[in-house]
Image (spheres, grey):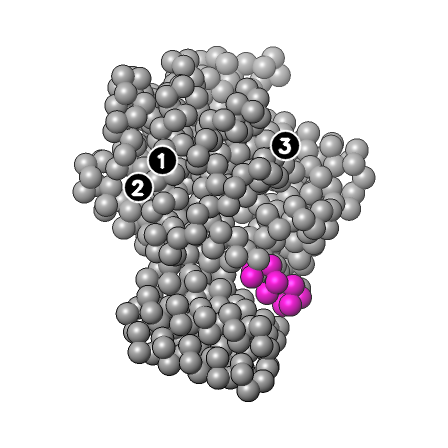
Amino acid sequence: MGREAECGAIQAVIDRALSGQGSLVMLWGDGPGVGKTRLAMEMSEYASHNGFQCSIGRCYERDEPFPFLPFVEIIESSLAQAGSLDDFRRKMGNNAAELAQLAPSLRRVFPDIPKPPELPPAQQRLYLFQSFSEALARAARTRPCLYILEDLHWADESTLALLTYLANRIAQLPVVIIGTYRSGYSKDNPVLVRTLVELIRMGIRPLKLSALSKDAVAQMLDGLSGRQAPGSLVSLIFDESQGYPFFVEEVYRHLIEEGKVFDAAGQFRTDMKIEEIDVPENVRLIIGRRLERLDENERRVLAAGAVIGRSFSFQLLSAISQIDVDELFTVIEKAQQMGIIIPSSEGPEHPFTFAHELVRQTLLAGISAPRQQRLHAVVAEAIERPSPGAADERAGEIANHLLKAGSFADSRRLVRWLKLAGKSALEAVAFEEARRSFLTALSHQGAVDLRERADLLSSLAIAERGLERGDAALANLREALEIYINLGDREMIGSSSTELTDALSQAGRIQEATETAVAGSRILRKM
Ligand SMILES: Nc1ncnc2c1ncn2[C@@H]1O[C@H](COP(=O)(O)OP(=O)(O)OP(=O)(O)O)[C@@H](O)[C@H]1O
Ligand SMILES: [Mg+2]
């Protein structure tokens, strides 16, 4: 409702893509709940009707980045939508190794996927991007594709780099990408700001969603109530919500729950007076007031879900909330009826999603910081426990919870998961994210012994080389070698001095490379 112009513009883009001319649409709005997701979903429906294959990938607010997360979600949901595994494997063709670099879970399904070719770090990313773009082009040959990348204000560097790469290439493909972001947050993400500048330079003008007009709010209320809403109610809700659809819904639901809108016969009250209607002054308070309808136990369970994240699985919530399964079902059902949570489209791992980030945050605000931290530690353990092998794929998520767990987390465990998360990021050629994980791990000095420090430094050096920060890489490699010499570890002295020699010669510092190689073999001979 009230989005005719925007719908028209995006439908035209979708129609154009049908004739082979693809586009990227960046959809943004000022505040939360203006309707970006809704519009993107409506467009996905339109595209589906026109034969498109549609997939969605989301970004989340995370302390510990998960490289390429929305693209991973897109790859995994394409697999879930595929006709058969053989068919999907065939479609991946020569790009399977690189797709598995992005989404390591593919290797569990297709153990035959080969290793990606060995390339110098700085070239790996370009190769990966080319490969992903080829896979996209191949998929689009069978069916035009629409990809929705949600909440890019939380995107990491790797995701935005791949998006920019694709934006340069989709003009010749029957592909539409819709990216959504909130401008208030974009200032906190300098990489997004840089990306937008780059996209604008390429001629992509972001499409802004403004608040709805009063007429559109009236239509929305007609839709919500199933009958024509009286002018007084429309005015009240329009003023309170400033035309933000999410707020419209919340104010409306609040008034319904207070019993202020309908009379005993279920009709709109005609004697409704604005003065007697008490609307809390901001949406957070409205949500808070609505959550008060839950009892303490129900609120506690949902707050535990909020600690897991925007989406949570029933199993995980049940593992951490320590209540009877039947009781948990009852809480979930009630929360669904109240519109607090909705079933999610993310597949069986994440079947529930909070209706809105503000709902999740309001639930979190209801529990103390130490309790939140303790719950994060419990969540990390619950993800880790059932299958240690599969947990490796979720290293970033576990590290994220352990970071948020503060003093409740065992720092040795935190370092171990950060190291694993960093190594998975290296596998995915996400050097920026890998670097962050290794640096965070190194900052927990008390939990890192010398051998581990050397290992982290060598891994950090790979990330630094990938980012073309040669001097930093050399300093890390030198320190790692020094540690192995002090430890007297022959094998590691050998490999570490080879790495340093290699990095020096690639930097054109041939003399130093030769000296390092000679010094290394002299040390080994003496041992
Ligand atoms: N034009 C509209 N007509 C009717 N309902 C709408 C409209 N736009 C949004 N809504 C409803 O308002 C709520 C918030 O919308 P939505 O989730 O799309 O906002 P958003 O901009 O994606 O928010 P966020 O920034 O938090 O991601 C949803 O329940 C949605 O269905
Ligand atoms: Mg949204």
Residue 77: percent from the left, percent from the top?
52, 30
Respond yes or no on whether mark 3 lies under 8 Å from ligand 2: no
Which numbered dot is residue 348? 3
Residue plotted at (65% across, 46% down) = 390
The residue to which callout 2 is attached is 165
Regarding residue 131, the answer to whether it shows in the image is: yes
Q: Say which of 220 and 16 sits in front.
A: 16
Closer to the camera: disc 3 or disc 1? Answer: 1
Q: Is residue 313 above or below residue 420?
A: above
Examine the image and state in which quarter residue 52 appears: top left
Q: Secondary structure at mark 1?
A: helix
510 sits left or right of 289 in the view:
left
Closer to the camera, 229 or 349?
349
Q: Residues within 10 Å of mark 1 (few under 14, many from 20)?
A: some
Q: Secondary structure at mark 3?
A: loop
The Cα–Cα distance between marks 3 and 1, rounded to whole angstroms, is: 28 Å
| Of pointers 2 and 1, the one earlier in the residue sequence | 1
Quadrant that contains the C terminus: bottom right
Check disc 2: other Cα within 10 Å, few if <14, some if 14-19, many if 20+. some
CA neighbours of label 3 inside 10 A, class few (<14), some (14 to 19), many (20+): few
Q: Which numbered disc flags the more N-terminal residue, 3 or 1?
A: 1
Residue 316 location (% of width, % of height): 69, 43
Corner quadrant of residue 402: bottom right
**Tag 3 or tag 2, which sits nearer the N-term?**
2
Of the two numbered discs 2 and 3 in the rendering, the one whose residue sits closer to the viewer: 2
Magenta region includes residue 412: yes
Residue pictured at 50% horizontal, 61% vertical: 437
- Left or right of 463 on screen, residue 261: right
Q: Which residues are magenta?
A: 409-419
- Tell me the residue that label 1 is attached to: 133
Amino acid type assigned to the residue bearing label 2 in the image: Tyr
* Disc 2 and disc 1 in contact, CB within 8 angstroms: yes
